[in-house]
Amino acid sequence: MLDRPLDSRAPGDRRPSLRQAPVSSELIEPEGLTLTALLAALRRRRWVLILCALLFPVVAFIAAQNLTPRYTATTSLIYETQSYQGPVLQGTLLPESTTDAVIASQVEVIRSLSVMRRVARQFNLDDRPEFAWWLRDAERASTPWYRLREALAQRLSAVSPDLAELVAPKPVADTPPKERAEVQAAEEARDRLLVTVLRNSRVLQVQFTSEDPQLARDVANMVAQLYTDDQLEAKFNAVRRANDYLGGQVRDLRQELQQTEQQIAALRATSGLQRGQDREASIAADLLRKLNTDLTEMRNRQAIAEARLAAVRSGSGGDITALGASNLVQQRAILDAARARLQGLSSNLGDRHPDVARARTEVNDAQRAVAGETTRVVQVLQTEAAAAAASVRSLEAQLREQEAKVNQNQTAEIQINALERSAEALRSLLRQVLERSQLTASQSAIEKADARVLSVATLPGEPSFPKIPLFVAAAVVLGVLFGLLVIWFLEQADSTIRSGDEVRSALGLPNLALVPMLRRGLLGRHRVEDYVVRKPLSPFAESMRTLRAALWLGAEPPRVVVITAARPGEGKTTTSVALARSAAMNGERVLLIDCDVRQPSLGRVFRAEGAAGVTDLLLGQAVLERIIRRDHLSSLDYIPAGAAEIHSLGLFMSEAMAGLLDRVRRDYDLIVLDAPPALAMADARVVARLADATLLCVKWRDTPRSVVRNSLALLEDAHARVVGACLTQVDAKVHGRSGYADAEVYHPRYGGYFRE
């Protein structure tokens, strides 16, 4: 069918010219990790991904089941400062405005060590292994591993003390003193205490985590209760100190008033003066009384001014608002806002950011403004006190002048009047202090804490750790990611050739055919070499026809084809026999020559072991007509290897080998040479140089690319014309699911074209 006209030249002129090896084309780089390639890799390695996605959640579930559960109880507080409406209910202590800094300070107050020490003392946390590390360390001594190491160390101490010290377990730590144990248990409990502020609110959430759900609930509620009690106690202490101070003032004023009244009574008794003297004395007395009244009023003003000045200097600031201190309050609010903004910028941007520097400058300016406003208020109070003192001195001078005009007889009355004025001033001051004391005493009755409990903690129904569904979900994600990583590693570590695209990218050669693997169940009683004849419509036979068509459809169809491989076991002999038989069944005149002299295979395949072959011909011990044999299943002619010859390289390099090829060219359409592996045997390179084309067999997913490249380089160095490669022993089912482009030929849609 494929007969071609024979060349009419003389035999000596028909020796094929040695073909120059084609210039090795650059390797085709793969396209990279595309979505299609990724999906194909996942499809090929899907069981790895499935195994990781199932194994990780199972391990996570088992681990979560073995973890000690922890329970979290939550108590909610709201922080709101108490403000009293009206002057009657106004407290001694001014409430502090609520800012972010104040709320953050309250968080630290709740988590303070003093609070947690009382909690540890209340619940005996130093006797619980959960909070006492020394108890957990003592439990270590009861483990089998500890006893095993201890016993082993005792046995080794007699042999090698150094080795015994290395093997011996770490000694159990001693129990710390009671005070230190309580502090350490409190610190451990403080690490379990979490206080958070709800966003854009003044609500504080107190959360405590413990292995005992009841303990978690009790500790969370107790921490909230201690915090509110401490706030109320601090206010009561402040009010108590104010009451003590005002009470002392009242006692001193009453004692001084009593002494003054006693002096008045004594002067009246000794001088005999009574009320209601003559007119002149009455006028003088009226004038002196008026001066005393003015002096008393001015002294009251001086006392009030000095009291306000003392209050401002002491920091209490009781009457600052009355003196125009609203600016000071505004400046303090600006200072708090600047400090809060500086704190926020510092935590987000760092100390060296320009915005932080500007915010720090604003804080300094606000501090200077507050200091300046405070100085102004103090100056105003000092001026008022100085003016009152000057008025008092002026009135006292006038009083002394008036008293000088009064005769000596009226001296006692003047003294009495002076004492009465002093007594009246003391009475007025005593009334003011008593009013202040009553206001302070009334505040203690209505004082409340700045924080109150919104909701108490309840008994946790389920553990907060571990969250098994969350653990399993995270393990699934981690398993998928790990599976993808393993798939990527396997893909990168797999250096074999798995498809025709990889043949082109790794070798720069076209892939002429995919030869499927013939499993034993499919073969039955047939041999692999006979399958192409027994099953001519099978995919295996079609791959041989594809290979033959690829050779024939080239720009210069070869007549002498060498089939070799990089190493043994690649399926080159099976491919050679199957290709030759397939071509013979197509009507071509085909000759198959066994050039693998050291390990001949055609004699076994065709049951012609020990028959004369190509080596006998090249040695001149046989003629061509005697060594050509006919295949019993097809019209194929074949020449076995013949006698083993260790100097086969010299035979293939001889003129006899070239003459043999010249001679058979005239009689056959296709001559197939089954050559030995090209990587280790030089015979293959010599035979490939003499042939028209060389076909390289590569075992699918078995032969490393580096080995194939090395073999290809050796063939190209021998100026062999390597026209392509052939993937052999391809698993049709596995390759059909691989996602490669050439896996399409194994799709079930082509099943109607084949007959197994």
Image: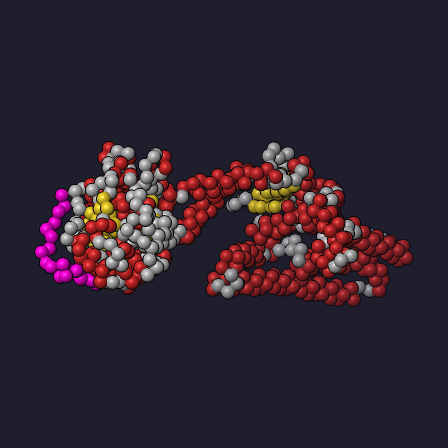
Quarter of the image with the N terminus is top left
By secondary structure, the bulk of the magenta-drawn segment is best described as: loop
Magenta stretch: residue 20 in it? yes
Q: Image point 72% across, 52% down: which residue?
A: 169
Residue at image position (51%, 45%) is 200
Range of residues picked out in magenta:
1-22
Tell me where residue 163 appears, x and y as whole percent: 72, 58
Relative depth, front residue between 753 and 107: 753
* Number of marks in picture: 0
- Please tell me which residue is depicted at 76% across the width and 58% down the height of the picture: 159
Looking at the image, residue 54 sits to the left or right of residue 170; the answer is: left
Choose between 177 and 147: the one closer to the eye.
Answer: 147
Image spot of residue 177 (x, y percent): 79, 51
Find residue 464 and report its horizontal and vertical position in percent. 59, 39
Tell me if 591 is positioned left or right of 520 in this view: left
Q: Position of residue 587 (x, y in %)?
A: 16, 42
In the image: residue 726, left or right of residue 91: left
Q: Quadrant of residue 72?
A: top right
Visible in this render: residue 83? no
Q: Nearer the viewer, residue 746 or 575?
A: 575
| Rendered image quadrant of residue 397 | bottom right
| Residue extending farthest right | 270
